[in-house]
Each structure stands twice: as structure tokens, then as C-alpha cells.
Amino acid sequence: MFIPIYDSNRLRYIRFQYVTIGLIAVNVFVFLYGWAVGETGAIVSSFELSYGFIPAVANGHVDLPPVYVAVPGWLNFVTYSFLHLDFWHLLGNMLFLWVFGDNVEDAFGHFKFLLFYLASAAAGAFAHAVIAPTSEGTLVGASGSVSAVVAAYLMLHPRVWVWVLVLGRIPLPLPAYIVLAAWIGLQFFMLVTGAADVSYAAHVGGIVAGALLTLVLRRSGVPLFDRKIVPPKAAALTDERERQY
């Protein structure tokens, strides 16, 4: 539907989005490491079994063989979010985090944003476990956390314009509320219709957690639902004036 590539939304409270960049770096590192140690041709590698999230294990329906137990079970509610199935899975999640994460980090502060990201990952895993309690499939990916970032951005900056690729190929600037509300609506629709292969429950769990956490974690004085519309050209002109003065 929409692939975000750039937003006209400068930072207001922090100088640099250290946590957002750090999370992207960790996700890339874990992907490369998992690819290096993964078994060639394996449907699910031992790395994914050890650090992914398995609802049947979390709910006590089956036991994970001891050889695959690498961390305490509660940590799998978070570690799964740093694993990805393939390059495109990783790229999609990291692109959303890159475009929208910096402004959410700006609104929360570095530490609160990290807490927000990890808590939303746990919420995504929890929602997945509720919807599919006996599933022995392995959940991986940062989609729960990224969905929370999308929800937070929509609540904070719905009127900021975002450059997107429509249908994956047509560049177009659109207000964030059109892009993100459509994306969020799609996640709920896909969950209700029971779409396979993707855990939309984790997406929806992250969206709900992101919306609720935004209410309590944003900085004091940071408003919800920005009133001012900032078109891309106007934002660029404003930045240029600020550099000149």
C-alpha cells in the first residue's frame, strides 16, 4: 500500500536519535549473526528457536528442548523482536523505524523511548499468544514495536507530511494521518479476516500498546495531534531559514 521514505518533521527536544539508530544497528547485527550461524536449508534454525517467541511454550503447552533454551522464558517476549526471517522483512521494519522513530524518541526522550520500544515488543508477543495460544510456530520480527511507533507518531504528528511510495513505486507526499491511519486500519482488517503467514495480532498488540504508552510516556508539554499542517516544501524552507539565522 504505502512505503514511507521521508518525513518533514525536524527534532525539537533532542540533538540526535541515538536510541533509534542503536535499535536499527542491533537489528541489523542480529540478522547478520543469525544468518551466519543458521543451518542452511532449515525451515526454523536453532537460533530462532532459542530467541524467537513460541506461544505454546510461553503458555506451558509444550516444553522447549533444553538444548534450545538460551535465555529465561520471559526474555523471549523481547528477544524475538530482534530476529527477522529475511532481508526484506528486516528492511521493511527498519524503514518504518527510521522514518518515524526519531520523532517519537524526540517526544519521549531517549530512555522512555527505549522502554516504549521493548514494552511494545512484549505487548505484541502477548497479543500473539492470546490469539494463537497453542501455536508451536516461532514468532520473529520487530513489527510489534514498529507498529507501536506508527501509532505513537499518528497520535503526535498526524498532520506532518510524509513522502511515500504508493504501490511500492509512485513517490507522493501525503499527510501522516492518511498514510498511518490506512496502515493501522489494514492491520485490524487483516487480523479480523484471519490472514495467514503474518502475525497481525502482534501488530495490533503493538498498536494498542503504543497508543496507551504515548499517553503516559511523552514529555510534559508535548501535545497530542499537532494542529499545524507542514507541507514538505514549507518544512524545507523553514529549516533553511533557521540555518541562515
Image (cartoon, rainbow, N blue to C red):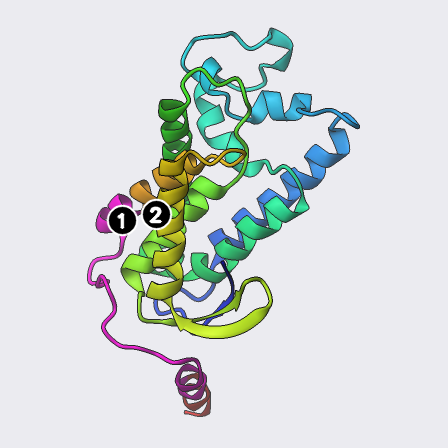
Question: In the rendered image of this protein, does residue 48 appear above or below residue 163?
Answer: above
**Res. 201 image quadrant:** top left
Q: Quadrant of residue 127?
A: top left
Q: Assess disc 2: are there few (<14), some (14-19) or many (≥20) residues with their C-alpha within 10 Å of its C-alpha.
A: some
Q: Over which residues does the magenta segment extend? A: 211-238
Mark 1 to mark 2: distance in Å?
6 Å
Location of residue 14 with respect to 150 vertically, above or below: below
Few, some or many residues within 10 Å of mark 1 (<14, 14–19, 20+): some
Is residue 224 shown left or right of residue 28?
A: left
Q: Which residue is mark 2?
A: 112
Q: Residue furthest right?
A: 40
Residue at (47%, 59%) from the top-left corner?
Answer: 17
Measured as percent of width and height from the top left, residue 123 is found at: 36, 34
Pinpoint residue 81: horizontal percent, then vertical percent: 51, 36
Residue at point 47%, 25% (across, down): 75
The amino acid on which the numbered mark 2 sits, given as a three-letter code, is Lys
SS label for mark 1: helix
The amino acid type, in three-letter code, at marker 1 is Leu
Q: Inspect this view and state whether residue 119 appears.
A: no
Residue at x 59%, y 21% (from the top left corner) = 50
Q: Is residue 216 magenta?
A: yes
User: What residue do we see at 40% from left, 69% from top?
Assistant: 11
Q: Secondary structure at mark 2?
A: helix
**Tag count in the figure?**
2
Picture disc at residue 150: none
Residue labelled with disc 1: 217
In the image, residue 161 lies at what x, y percent? 39, 73
* Residue 107 is one of the magenta-drawn residues: no
Residue 113 image point, x, y percent: 38, 49
